[in-house]
């Protein structure tokens, strides 16, 4: 209950003292890993502050340590346009390519002396934090590099992100950029708790972090224990005059309470960099976070400005990625699994082996072509590595260890899930496949039939044994790659896999529906389609019977089953309110992943409008080409998919997208604009940025939905189409005047 009396000077001073003390202990614990007090003592400080603020709510400030976690879920994320683009970084895989990078730097700086800073490449989620007058004002994801999502509410819960900067001397505006990650100890602890509760464990820290930051309820994010580490800066106004290098900036950021990498090292030349790269390959495995390489950066900011950037990446830095860790194991057997589209995928069952910090028992063999190419057999000793440090896959055979009784792998004669006939289809009709004959280079080339057949491998070798940009070994043509498919559209194996995707964290995000429970529900015909999930409340007892293995103690089953079923049914009910973008990503529509689903949902707003869109309408969406538009239109034309949408709507699943806030309003707000021809005042990227800045949406093709066409010199057929459709045409000068009204 709040106090009716104004706070005394001593109370105000006590509140500020408590806040400063809590911030200091947060920095010691979460940034420096050097706590000075126990958890109980820390909790007592926070509780004392909460009680004082409860008595004097007029003294509560947004940067108070008690205000990290918002109490209300968001309806959606607004879009944020980055003041400076968050560019990607070019990758290299060999010391020679680092030397090539160094030669380009030397040439760009005209022989001027320079130094490097080498930093760990954290496998996390890139974000930007904006501080205004020392207070956290905004946090955003990288997004497409130009526009990201405003996730300020979620980033406030990350304890290593200061809500107010420490020390003095910070600029009026400070934007820091870095990675949010899930420390391995906290991630493993969470997975143990999820397994004990019968929930599906998270696959890996990086994906789990991305899914966590997409939560609309910050209270969920606060429970996960995410962390942040800064690796660079964006806009700074004004720039501290004494800061000329990245290392100097890191020292300032540390003083202001922002965590930076304590292992970053200055290197005098590229050979020093290469030595550090080799040394760090072992040391990186002792860190609390996953990393697949290091980032090599020019130290001085003025030299970075002179080197500049391409449209995609800076010229002053390069990421060195380490070879994937490999292990040897014996192939015990091969299972054939059914995918969501009926694809039969071989999975290797292995003797357990430690690989990149986890025990691996299963690994992907991709398809029958891969089995044939590797000539892998049951009983072989195989090489296993993790693709992208995540998914185990068989990449080779240790031939000298092959036993005399090794057995060839035979494809299944019928679908392993339903017994239906199998069919063989080309992966991509009209394509030829060319394999590199170098067994160390696990990549293959594909070329369209009409293109020139390559004579040598021009792809990077998988583990860095490349020469230049490829391994330069000869390639040989192999038969067109084919997939083995189940012919039964009602196959329970397909349905189980589609449900697993539907319930995934980046789709409908239904907690508690793990792979085993989904399989039991499909096998018992409790769930035969997506809409059946939302009817499970009517069959509660059947759900409880499926949640425990036979033989479970009856009293335990009753108590635990009721609690677990309550949570599951609540999660299913909650998923009805997910935005349209989540539903689109969940429906297994060809070519539609999370990003494309978001773009489609934002563009059309409702499922009804999207389902009615023709191919030209679909191509208006950024990133949708003719092939994608045709496939999406075909999906919506299918009668069974139309039934799926109708059934989901009937059970109350949301079919609309909350519209994200525009980065700015203006004369182009809500307008679709096409630019054609050569402009004298603007480059293409500059005018598209102006259109977005003033609330419009630049697109590449003219349709009945286009509001304006800006025509420069030699406009071509787009101008003719605009005139045919009656779309208003603006000259470059008309466009400029429109913006300055």
Image: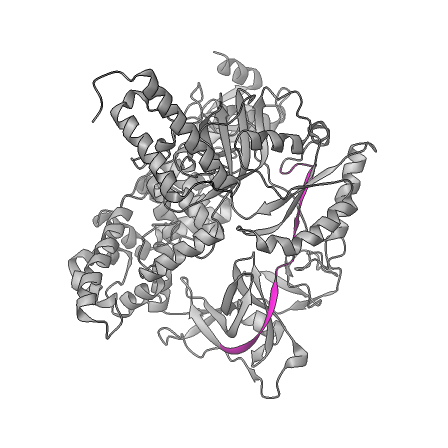
In the rendered image, the vertical position of residue 542 relative to residue 36, given as above or below: below
Residue 510, image x, y percentages: 31, 52
Q: Nearer the viewer, residue 637 or 543?
A: 543
Region of the chain picked out in magenta, as a range: 312-333
Query: Does the magenta-highlighted stretch encompass residue 568?
Result: no
Name, please, the residue furthest toward the right.
111
- Residue 734 % position (x, y): 53, 15
Rendered residue at 26%/62% (across/down)? 527
- Does 331 appear in magenta? yes
Instruction: Give residue 120's position: percent from left, percent from top.
Output: 62, 46
- The image's colouring method is one colour
Please tell me how many numbered marks the rendered image carries. 0
Hey, which residue is sitting farthest bottom in the picture?
A: 405
Q: Determine whether, in the image, residue 634 is placed left or right of residue 577.
A: right
Query: In the rendered view, does 561 fall on the left or right side of 670?
Result: left
- Image quadrant of residue 108? top right
**Whole-percent x, y for residue 53 in the image:** 30, 26
- Seen at 41% across and 62% down, the residue is 341
Is residue 70 in sight in this rendering? no
455 w.r.t. 627: above or below? below
Report if residue 204 is visible in the image: yes
Quadrant of the image for the N terminus? top left
Depicted 34 relative to depicted 207: above or below: above
Q: Residue at x 21, y 55 (%)?
A: 566
Q: On the image, which quarter does residue 442 sit in?
A: bottom right
Question: On the picture, is 676 further left or further right than 200?
Answer: right
Q: Residue at point 50% right, 49% down?
A: 627
Q: Nearer the viewer, residue 170 or 296?
A: 170
């Amino acid at each position: 209950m709040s106090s009716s009396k104004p706070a005394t000077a001593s109370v105000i001073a006590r509140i500020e003292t408590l806040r400063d003390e809590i911030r200091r202990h947060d920095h010691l614990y979460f940034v420096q890993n050097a706590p000075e007090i126990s958890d109980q003592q820390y909790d007592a400080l926070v509780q004392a502050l909460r009680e004082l603020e409860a008595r004097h709510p007029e003294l509560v400030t947004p940067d108070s340590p008690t205000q990290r976690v918002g109490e209300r879920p968001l309806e959606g994320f607004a879009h944020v346009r980055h003041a400076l683009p968050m560019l990607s970084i070019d990758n290299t895989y060999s010391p020679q390519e680092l030397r090539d990078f160094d030669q380009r730097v030397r040439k760009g700086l005209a022989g001027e002396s320079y130094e490097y800073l080498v930093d760990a490449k954290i496998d996390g989620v890139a974000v930007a934090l904006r501080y205004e007058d020392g207070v956290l004002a905004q946090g955003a994801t990288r997004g497409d590099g130009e526009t990201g999502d405003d996730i300020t509410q979620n980033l406030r819960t990350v304890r290593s992100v200061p809500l107010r900067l420490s020390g003095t001397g910070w600029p009026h505006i400070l934007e820091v950029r870095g990675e949010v990650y899930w420390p391995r100890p906290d991630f493993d602890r969470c997975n143990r708790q999820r397994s004990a509760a019968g929930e599906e464990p998270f696959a890996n820290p990086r994906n789990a972090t991305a899914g966590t930051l997409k939560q609309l309820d910050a209270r969920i994010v606060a429970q996960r224990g995410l962390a942040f580490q800064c690796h660079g800066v964006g806009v700074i106004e004004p720039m501290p005059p004494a800061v000329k290098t990245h290392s100097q900036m890191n020292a300032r950021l540390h003083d202001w309470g922002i965590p930076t990498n304590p292992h970053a090292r200055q290197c005098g030349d590229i050979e020093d960099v290469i030595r550090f790269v080799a040394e760090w390959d072992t040391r990186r495995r002792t860190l609390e976070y996953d990393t697949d390489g290091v980032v090599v950066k020019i130290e001085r900011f003025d030299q970075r400005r002179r080197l500049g950037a391409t449209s995609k990446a800076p010229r002053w830095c390069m990421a060195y990625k380490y070879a994937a860790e490999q292990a040897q194991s014996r192939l015990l057997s091969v299972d054939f699994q059914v995918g969501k589209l009926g694809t039969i995928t071989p999975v290797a069952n292995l003797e357990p082996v430690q690989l990149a910090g986890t025990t691996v028992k299963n690994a992907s063999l991709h398809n029958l072509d891969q089995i044939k190419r590797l000539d892998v057999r049951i009983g072989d000793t195989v090489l296993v590595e993790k693709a992208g440090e995540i998914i185990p896959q068989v990449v080779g055979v240790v031939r000298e260890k092959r036993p005399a009784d090794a057995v060839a792998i035979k494809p299944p004669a019928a679908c392993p899930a339903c017994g239906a006939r199998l069919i063989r289809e080309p992966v991509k009709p009209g394509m030829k496949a060319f394999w590199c004959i170098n067994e160390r280079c696990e990549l293959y080339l594909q070329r369209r039939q009409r293109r020139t057949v390559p004579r040598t491998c021009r792809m990077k070798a998988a583990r860095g044994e490349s020469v230049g940009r490829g391994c330069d070994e000869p390639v040989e043509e192999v038969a067109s790659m084919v997939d083995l498919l189940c012919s039964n559209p009602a196959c329970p194996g397909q349905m189980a896999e589609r449900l697993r995707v539907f319930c995934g964290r980046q789709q409908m995000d239904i907690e508690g529906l793990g792979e085993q429970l989904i399989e039991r529900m499909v096998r018992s015909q409790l769930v035969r389609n997506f809409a059946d999930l939302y009817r499970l409340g009517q069959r509660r007892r059947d759900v409880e019977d499926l949640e425990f293995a036979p033989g479970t103690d009856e009293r335990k089953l009753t108590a635990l089953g009721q609690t677990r079923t309550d949570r599951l049914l609540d999660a299913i009910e909650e998923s009805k309110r997910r935005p349209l973008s989540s539903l689109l990503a969940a429906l297994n529509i060809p070519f539609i992943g999370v990003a494309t689903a978001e773009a489609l949902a934002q563009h059309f707003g409702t499922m009804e409008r999207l389902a009615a869109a023709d191919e030209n309408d679909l191509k208006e969406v950024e990133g949708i080409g003719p092939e994608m538009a045709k496939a999406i239109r075909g999906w919506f034309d299918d009668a069974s998919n139309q039934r799926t949408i109708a059934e989901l709507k009937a059970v109350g699943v949301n079919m609309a997208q909350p519209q994200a806030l525009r980065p700015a309003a203006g004369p182009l707000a809500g307008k679709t604009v096409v630019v054609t021809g050569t402009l004298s005042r603007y480059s293409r990227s500059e005018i598209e940025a102006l259109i977005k800045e003033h609330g419009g949406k630049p697109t590449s093709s003219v349709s009945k939905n286009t509001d304006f066409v800006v025509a420069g010199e030699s406009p071509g057929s787009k101008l003719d189409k605009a005139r045919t459709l009656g779309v208003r045409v603006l000259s470059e000068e008309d466009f400029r005047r429109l913006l300055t009204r």
